[in-house]
Image: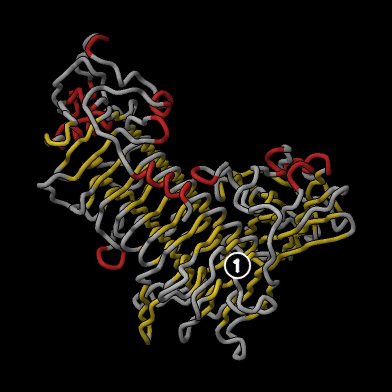
Amino acid sequence: MDSKRREFLKANLVLPALTGGAGLATSALANAGGNLAASASAGPVGMTEAEKLAGVSIVDSGFPPGNVRRYGAVGDGGADDTASLQAAFDAAQAANFSFPVYLPTGDYVINSPLRIRGGAPKSLVLVGDGGAFGIRNTRITAGSRWSGDSMIQADGKRKNGWTITDVWFDARTRARCILDLRELNYLTLRGCRFAGSTGTVDRHGLAAVIMENGWVTRIENCVFAECGDGLYTSISTNNLNVWGCSFVGNKGIGFRARGCYSVNISGSVFEDNEQTGILLDICRSVWISGNYFEMNGRRGYEYRKGDKRTVRADIIANGWVSPEMKSKDPCKGIGVFGNYFMPPNEGSFDSSIYLIAVDGFTEAANEVHKQYPVPAAFIKTRNFPGLYKAANLTLSNSFVQGLRNPGSRDQYLEVAGLNDERVRNYDVELGRTLSTHPVVVPRFNAHEDLGLDPLTYRSLSDLGGRPVISRTDSLRMGRPVYQAELSTNGSSDLVGATIPESAYQEFWAGRLWMAYLEVQGIDGSVVFEIEIGIGDRRYRNGGRVSTSGGFDPRIIIFKPVQGTDFRFGLNISGSSPGQKVAFSRPVICPLGAMHELHGPYAS
């Protein structure tokens, strides 16, 4: 890892000396509303009806409701502030979270879990004091008398709309979990640091942050460091976006997802996570772009099914979870684009990307800048006996440094079972150096930036008439979902938009582009195809999808040609008149620019 990257990580992992005081209100605090940083000079605030209902005591009325100083918090790193912080949570909940919970600069020691009690709380906002350059001035620490599993535990059933900003959580190897956020929709974690938890999913069913059965989650500019497992999302945690985060020095797995749909991991760092950087178990529609990987998988992740096997890799995607679940479903629709890998050049290592029972894997424009140790390779595929066989691999346009035999697949790809048809539809184009680093690209989404909403699509070809398109309330990876009702004869419909060369010329030079779309049948199976047209050339990718099959992701990698427009189209063929299909708003942009990158490699 070069000196600039190391300095960035150090800056985000070191907290300056913490002192008491009200601190400064952050931009997130201002957005949350309320002058929570007010001091006694602003005048006392009497007990509110919500505080009476919660049964809390006011210690310093000079601070407004929600400020933990109001309820007696000291924040000196020594005093036990458990009761004061719990009082702030209780008061906010009694007020239906009409004000945030605010922690001014300080180190707040707790010795038992903070609980959001009962019912279905809405719109909790927990805000720390964020300093300059992303430094977190607020810390919550598990004290020497700690008892319990999770530092913050969400009680009750379905919850909605939580935001936690600019807080350092330090479990001090005392708590197994920091945030237990199950059954939670619309969660945002921004600018937080999670350190020192000991829980792992395989041993305790826990991680530093655990989420289960939730929708629409944003995790931005957070650090997961020196924990057991870092981030764990499970059982239908859908529309998850991880941007600009650091997963560094965890004893287990940096980020693990099980049974999740529509996961985006962009602009993040995965370094020195002992088991692996990213582990995907039976996931669908996963996008991994613009990340940095180094020295993951030293200890490796151990599988047990028939024979014990240890895998040492940066990214592991597998269609098998555990013998108890008896699942034979594949991981489906995995895309790995524009990432930067620094594999170890000594010791035991399998690959940067390790695929077990994966159907529909696309890789392009990644870079590897260190030679793999023998017998490691950039990508390996394997199968456990009786599992779904690997299928539909598309690998192209990546640069791998130091190939032993540049004209072959040696050290680029190692495939298990080609002769016994365990891998089907295999296609590879050997890597070549790109003229521009794929990670550092301007953000440009042709549909968003040019305002080409699917509602304005016109028919690109007369193949049966234009479908009726309407927008739904659903989201896929943060993008709206649309519904198309096919023409009365149920035949093919090709609709889309033409993007003039003048609109994208400043972005196209020397870059590979991609088009990404997800499609689902609503009232029966449909055959669909996305198409990119560049002059007289056509690029196509499609398949058959049914109502029960979920959203099916499709990706096209292409290179624009100077002096030409390019056209995007969606070709749908149904089986009955007026049949309906859902599709996500397309992304058409340079590789690595699906979302604006945050963190160390954004400039």
Instruction: Please tell me whether residue 603 is drawn above or below residue 253 in the rendered image.
Output: above
- Residue at x-position 22% and y-position 20%: 49
Residue 71 position, x and y percent, is 17, 26
Residue 298 appears in which quarter of the rendering? bottom left
Residue 339 appears in which quarter of the rendering? bottom right
Q: Is residue 332 left or right of residue 312?
A: right
- Residue at x-position 34% and y-position 54%: 210
Instruction: Please tell me whether residue 107 is drawn above or below residue 479 in the rendered image.
Output: above
- How many marks can you see? 1
User: Is residue 329 visible from the viewing direction of this image?
Assistant: no
- Residue at x-position 58% and y-position 42%: 596
Viewer-closest of 542 and 29: 29
Question: Given the image, on which type of amino acid does mark 1 rest?
Answer: Gln
Instruction: Please tell me whether residue 475 is drawn above or below residue 310 in the rendered image.
Output: above
SS at badge 1 = loop
- Residue at x-position 26% and y-position 25%: 67
Extreme residue in the bottom direction? 420
Instruction: Please tell me whether residue 487 is drawn above or below residue 507 in the rendered image.
Output: below
Image color mode: secondary structure
Residue named by callout 1: 401
Q: Is residue 501 left or right of residue 72?
A: right
Residue 500 position, x and y percent, is 83, 43
Viewer-closest of 493 and 444: 444
Q: Is residue 162 left or right of residue 178?
A: right
Q: Quadrant of the C terminus?
A: top right
Residue 411 appears in which quarter of the rendering? bottom right
Residue 365 position, x and y percent, is 64, 60
Q: Is residue 17 left or right of residue 74?
A: right
Extreme residue in the left direction? 145
User: Is residue 94 visible from the viewing direction of this image?
Assistant: yes
Dot 1 surroundings within 10 Å: few (below 14), some, or many (20 or more)? some
Residue 367 position, x and y percent, is 59, 61
